[in-house]
Amino acid sequence: MGGLDVFALRPFLPAKDFELSKRFYQALGFKTVLDGDVAIFGTGPHSFILQNYFEKTWAENTMMQLMVEDLDAWWAHIESLDLAGKFGVQPPRPPAVQPWGLTVAYVFDPAGVLWHVAQKPPTGREGPT
């Protein structure tokens, strides 16, 4: 669309403890793209902005979806991290088929943001692109 092409779409996520949240996302495997007043974390062409700001209601109502090729491999990685022990977060919930058809594992970040780590569905069922 001549001049209207989008370069990036990045949600802002809250951090109750900015340094702890940065270590959490690095442990999960996100690469630090920028580390300053805000931090940008990415994987492949996807990224989000972590801000040093916390509002409990907002944080605990924020959800992210991470659609992956191999949820079993991701789950093994998540389990190996001992996120609850190392970061004081709610224990991750193992993969399970949800009523809407996706297989999803749940991970909570240190601010209470809920991540849906989902198995990529068969081609043609992933929704709008």
Image: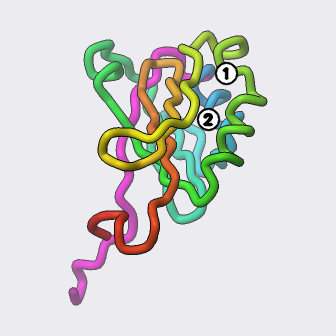
Q: In the structure shown, which secondary structural element does the residue marked by tag 1 occupy?
A: helix
Question: Which is more foreground, mark 1 or mark 2?
Answer: 1
Q: Position of residue 64 (x, y in %)?
A: 40, 40
In the image, 116: left or right of 79? left
Residue 61 shown in magenta: no
Magenta region, residue range: 1-19
Relative to 94, is 5 above or below? below
Q: Position of residue 108 (x, y in %)?
A: 50, 24
Q: Amino acid at mark 2?
A: Tyr
Q: Quadrant of the N terminus?
A: bottom left
In the rendered image, which quarter is residue 126 located in?
A: bottom left
Identify which residue is drawn at 30% across, 45% down: 100
In the image, 41: left or right of 85? left
Q: In the structure shown, which secondary structural element does the residue marked by tag 2 occupy?
A: helix
Q: Give the CA distance from mark 1 to mark 2.
A: 10 Å
Q: Which residue is mark 1?
A: 83
Question: Residue lying farthest bottom?
Answer: 2
Identify which residue is drawn at 58% across, 30% down: 94
Q: In the rendered structure, which disc, 1 or 2, sits on the residue that comes first in sequence?
A: 2
* Picture disc at residue 91: none
Identify which residue is drawn at 35% across, 22% down: 59
Prevailing secondary structure class for the magenta stretch in the rendered image: loop
In the image, 127: left or right of 88? left
Q: Which residue is mark 2?
A: 25
Q: Amino acid at mark 1?
A: Leu
Relative to 9, is 63 above or below? above
Relative to 80, is 126 above or below? below
